[in-house]
Amino acid sequence: MAQYNHSAIEKKWKKRWEEHPINVDDGKKPKYYCLDMFPYPSGSGLHVGHWRGYVISDVWSRYQVLKGHYVIHPMGWDAFGLPAENYAIKMGVHPAKSTAENVANIKRQINEIAAIYDWDREVNTTDPKFYKWTQWIFVQMFKKGLAYEKEFPINWCPSCKTGLANEEVVDGKCERCGTPVTKKNLRQWMLRITKYADRLLNDLDKLDWPEKVKKMQSDWIGKSYGAEVNFKVDGSDDNIVVYTTRPDTLYGATFMVLSPEHELAKKLATDDQREAVEKYIFDSSMKSNVDRMQSKEKTGVFTGSYAINPLNGAKTPIWLSDYVLADYGTGAIMCVPAHDDRDFDFAKKFGLPIVQVITKDGEEIENMTEAYTDAVGTMINSGDWNGMESAKLKLEAPQMIEEKGYGKKTTNYKLRDWVFSRQRYWGEPIPIVHCPCCGNVPVPEDQLPLELPKVESYQPTGTGESPLAAIDEWVNTTCPVCGGPAKRETNTMPQWAGSSWYFLRYVDPHNDKELVSKEMADKYLPVDMYIGGVEHAVLHLLYSRFYTKFLHDIGVVDFDEPFTKLFNQGMINGSDGQKMSKSKGNVVSPDDLVRDYGCDALRMYELFVGPPELDADWDDRGIEGVSRFLNKFYKLVMDNKDKNVEADRELLRVRANLISDIEQRFNAFSLNTVIAGFMEYNNKLNELSKKNGVDKETLKAFTILLAPFAPHIGEELWEELGESGSVFHAEWPTFDESHKEVDTIEVPVQINGKTKLVIELDANVSKEDAIEAGKKALSEAGKLEGTIRKEIYVPKKIINIVVG
Ligand code: ANZ
Ligand code: ZN
């Protein structure tokens, strides 16, 4: 009997697929767009952790092919940005060269997975033919007033020597290199994503995404309702406007805090506090926002001035503290230590009064040990408001405050405009010309792409200017409007620029007239299934949604959400339980496993390690089990394919349940239990094989179900079963619901009312047959003695033989 020879089989089918691709658009099939988050072509190569996401998306894509779709399943490279540039600097080669090498290398490794990528659709964000359109989008945004310049202190990584978006600062450190982030005043290009805040928030409802991701997006947008309240500064004409989401607690405001950057901060300092105030303002300017938000120990300084609570005329001291951010709300807050954690800490530290204004149970707490932060309970110590319900008051107070002229009701967002410029070389040049007469002028569209010039020194300058600023012949240009001398913008775009829209390009990758033609966009977009890591839950996905909405608004596409369904795969950890990565030295390379067990076995093991949405620990040894299964199934088919077995009820039942179970688990994206199911049914069929053999229909159904996971062996066995053409063009197997029913029952067999044994019977067995079977079982077991007086069968319950 032929043995399962994975290397021969896999080689054979790789070649066959090259000659006869299995996924072709015939113009009739419905489309299905299954997208992987495209990778950075880093230099370190693929490990088994990287395989997982690609295997998941390929299994899903092949399933859709089998379900009769033409599947768009493309791959490309997110090759601009810091990782590529840092790598290039480290290795001393030009980023263009190292990027091209890395792409070639990863592409070879990705092909080992045997995914049905359509390489004809390949895109690379660093290809001028691609970034022409990245620049084109920027120009459209500029024309619509969505791209603008602004000077302000930005997060600055002293090691990468570039500005960073808030999103790129993690725990106060540069996301890329871990260096603590500082501040630097720089002229920046901004994108007005805040204009889309409400749509980005509301349209989350349309999406079939994990709830967790939707929540992260809505928290990031951070819409809140509240009031702006005016506090007059005592003895001056100045006003401090605070933003509060808890105007119900106004009577409990015992002090105020301004951010150190607040325009009144210095002015409010009284003579004896001036020195301390100025020192405090300087020290805070050196910290990043994230540091300020997260630092446990509160710091602050009293200005010496007081403000008047508009409600009760109370004089409240004004402090500065860096836990109040300059760029949120109004940069000033009223502090209610009894009901806010941060204010409570601050009050405790600086000995400020704490006044409780909400009580849960009617009692006033003697000495509060922590803030009571729920807006649940009854108002106390609150003048006219005493006795009111705080939840209700919280909703009504903004209106009341507005009517009384103390302030106005407002909405706030945490979302900020997007810092879109980088002072680096390896990115798309921002296509703007600065003209002394005409101001900022976009590069005319027929002159795009504005190519990144080749330079000798691509190291960051550290002056806050991009290396492009040093190339005079590039910088000096003429104004597209007046023809006078002008200078090019030297900042480049962030890595997110290309990844915010690349998925649109895949459906029309060679179009040099449009970003994507209307025809192709209508035919293939939007993305039906997007698969990638949860680390992109906020930024990449939010930016892509913003870009898509913008392109919708200017008529490029008809839809305004790019990714209908999203799946986040879990990570693979090394045997040490830590995320697999080269830097941790716990990487397992797929090469040996493919050589020893085959691509099919590794694909299946990638999924068998656990639920695809959860992290899993890798253990090489586990692949043995999957490999045994493939060998056993191969043998099952080879043993039975020529036997011409007729399916009996039992085989029909096993087949129906196999198809039903697998399909159900598949649709629930429970890919690990699909594989467990394969193993279980394989064992059952092997038992039946020993009895009377297994029929061909059942073997075919199994082979089709298995094919998305183990495509090579799927094709091979399909051929062995006498079929011509690819298994991926087979009809998805169906079954008869009625076959699924369990058609055997267990019936106790008694002698004189005492159970002697239990037998298995056909559920619809006749009385005669049941009694016959019962007697046979009893006598085989040597338990039938004496003369039979009576034979009783209670259908499906009991066989009782009365002897005497
Ligand atoms: C009084 C108060 C009482 C507050 C209370 C909370 C609880 P979200 O929901 O995040 O919008 N705040 C306002 N501006 C701030 C800033 N620039 N930096 C730091 N904190 C700021 O939170 C709004 C609340 O956060 C506001 O409501 C304000 O404190 C604070 F029992 O005002 B609250
Ligand atoms: Zn000009």
Image (cartoon, rainbow, N blue to C red):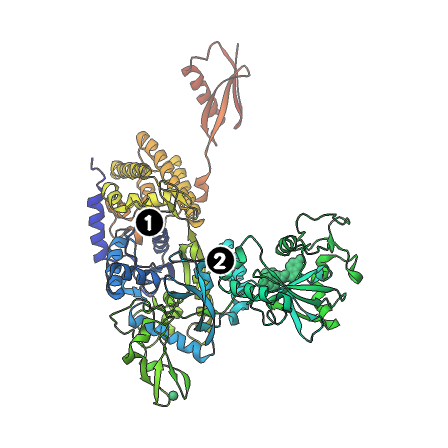
How much space separates mark 2 and mark 1, taking CA atoms?
A: 35 Å
Instruction: Give the quadrant of residue 120.
Output: bottom left
Mark 2 Cα shell of 10 Å, populated few (<14), some (14-19), many (≥20): some
Residue 694: % across, % down: 32, 36
Query: Is residue 382 something that shows in the picture?
Result: yes
Residue 438: % across, % down: 41, 87
Viewport quadrant of the N terminus: top left
Q: Which is nearer the N-term, disc 2 or disc 1?
A: 2
**Horizontal placement of 530 versus 467: left or right?**
right
Which amino acid lies under the numbered mark 2 shown in the image of this protein?
Asp
Of residues 544 and 554, the one nearer the viewer is 544
Of residues 605 and 70, the one nearer the viewer is 605
Q: Is mark 2 on a helix, strand or loop?
A: loop
Residue 772: % across, % down: 45, 21
Q: Is residue 598 above or below residue 274?
A: above
Q: Which mark is drawn over residue 681?
A: none
Query: Is residue 76 something that shows in the picture?
Result: no
**Horizontal placement of 628 versus 385: left or right?**
left
Residue 597: % across, % down: 26, 41
Which amino acid lies under the numbered mark 1 shown in the image of this protein?
Ser
Ligand 1: which quarter? bottom right
Disc 2, ligand 1: is the CB inside 8 Å? Answer: no
Of residues 274 and 562, the one nearer the viewer is 274
Q: Is residue 119 above or below residue 581?
A: below
Instruction: Give the quadrant of residue 691.
Output: top left
Q: Which mark is drawn over residue 583?
A: 1
**Horizontal placement of 564 versus 352: left or right?**
left
Q: Which mark is drawn over residue 208?
A: 2
Q: Do the residues labelled 2 and 1 touch (CB within 8 Å)?
A: no
Q: Is mark 1 on a helix, strand or loop?
A: helix
Q: In this view, does 729 lie above or below 803?
A: below
